[in-house]
């Protein structure tokens, strides 16, 4: 049977990405255009992000087709992320995808951005089969999702306030470490003592699989106010390690406990915070005690990219779950089937 190719678009935040995958989860091409213009603002400026997506998406698509040595007539379906994310940014990707879908009479497959992060694992770990448990951790989302099949799932835990990635960013800002905060805290923490400060862990009840980080951020700020500059400078790696441990410890403990209780053989780590080295290591070690295997994408696939969008679209393509051209975007947080 000849290969079938999916052309995918990702524009949910500040990275424009275009990718082509075949239906065996093999990447043909995966191009990403980042937006360093936001760095001076200390965060993402939505209006600027939308305008830069408009500028980049056509060029990236042309480059993807040229690099893959394919043309649009070789494509079997168009995939695009439509929620959650910045509405203006999502609209750019969806409008462009709709245009190609309509003009070539190709099926349109709409994908949840968080679901895409989960399916990034399948690109490098094709042996994964359901049931599995997914821990999604990113700048705006923290969710625990139980998959019975590739297309049926239940959210069994989520953050009640702030996300893990948001906590890394805000802690880094309080420490004067810049944006984004996750990578710099991860690097500093490698030479620090995670027990230096015992920051609070919220919702410690054994069978509560939700997360909360607003109290942690307040505790970090309160502690920092009481310190002199010399203490902060001298102990920065220890502080970073303590902050990091307070963020990832509930993620590890609750994920492994749920998988153990429900006899789930696989845990899939997903999202931008899945790049955190301590989270990868501690989750793998903790799960292995109960014979549970942990998967996570390579660092490049942890970040927003269109290859993961195409990967999440493959089960929908195979099941014939296509979207009408009347479909719209949504900014609502969380994993929703679309």
Image (spheres, rainbow, N blue to C red):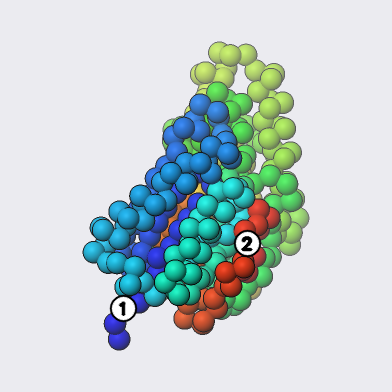
Q: Which numbered disc covers residue 328?
A: 2
138 relative to 192, above or below: below
Callout in the foreground (2, 1):
2
- Using the image as rendered, state which of residue 81 and residue 250 is in the foreground: 81
Q: Is residue 37 visible?
A: yes
In this picture, residue 206 sits left or right of residue 26: right
- Residue 228 percent location from the top left of the image: 62, 14
Between 270 and 199, the one nearer to me in the picture:
270
Q: Which residue is mark 1?
A: 3
Q: Report x, y in % for residue 29.
A: 31, 60
Q: Position of residue 166 (x, y in %)?
A: 61, 41
Around disc 1, counting alpha carbons within 10 Å, would you say few (fewer than 14), some (14 to 19), or many (20 or more)?
A: few
In this image, 64 relative to 136: left or right?
A: left
Q: Residue at x 58, y 72 (%)?
A: 324
Q: Quadrant of residue 262?
A: bottom right
Q: Residue at x 51, y 64 (%)?
A: 98
- 211 with respect to 319 (left or right): right
Tell me the element at label 2.
loop
Identify which residue is drawn at 74% across, 51% down: 160
């Amino acid at each position: 049977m000849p290969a079938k190719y999916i052309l995918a678009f990702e524009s949910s935040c500040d990275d424009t990405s275009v990718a082509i995958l075949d239906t065996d989860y093999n990447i043909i091409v995966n191009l990403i255009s980042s937006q360093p213009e936001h760095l001076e603002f200390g965060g993402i400026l939505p209006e600027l992000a939308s305008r830069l997506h408009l500028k980049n998406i056509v060029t990236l698509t042309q480059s993807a087709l040229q690099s893959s040595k394919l043309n649009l007539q070789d494509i079997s379906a168009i995939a695009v992320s439509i929620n959650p994310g910045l509405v203006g940014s999502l609209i750019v990707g969806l409008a462009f995808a709709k245009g190609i879908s309509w003009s070539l009479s190709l099926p349109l497959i709409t994908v949840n951005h968080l679901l895409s992060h989960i399916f990034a694992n399948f690109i490098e770990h094709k042996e994964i089969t359901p049931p599995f448990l997914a821990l999604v951790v990113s700048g705006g989302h923290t969710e625990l999702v139980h998959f019975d099949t590739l297309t049926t799932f239940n959210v069994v835990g989520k953050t009640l306030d702030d996300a893990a990635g948001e906590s890394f960013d805000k802690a880094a800002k309080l420490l004067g470490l810049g944006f984004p905060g996750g990578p710099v805290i991860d690097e500093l923490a490698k030479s620090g003592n995670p027990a230096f400060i015992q920051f609070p862990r919220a919702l410690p009840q054994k069978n509560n699989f939700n997360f909360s980080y607003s109290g942690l951020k307040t505790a970090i700020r309160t502690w920092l106010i009481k310190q002199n500059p010399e203490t902060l400078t001298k102990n920065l790696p220890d502080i970073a390690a303590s902050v990091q441990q307070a963020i990832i410890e509930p993620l590890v403990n609750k994920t492994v406990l749920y998988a153990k209780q429900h006899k789930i053989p696989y845990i899939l780590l997903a999202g931008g915070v899945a790049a955190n080295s301590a989270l990868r290591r501690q989750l793998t070690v903790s799960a292995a005690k109960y014979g549970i295997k942990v998967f996570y994408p390579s660092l490049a696939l942890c970040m927003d990219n269109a290859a993961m969008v195409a990967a999440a679209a493959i089960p929908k393509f195979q099941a014939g779950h296509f979207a009408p051209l009347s479909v719209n975007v949504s900014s609502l947080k969380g994993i929703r089937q679309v």
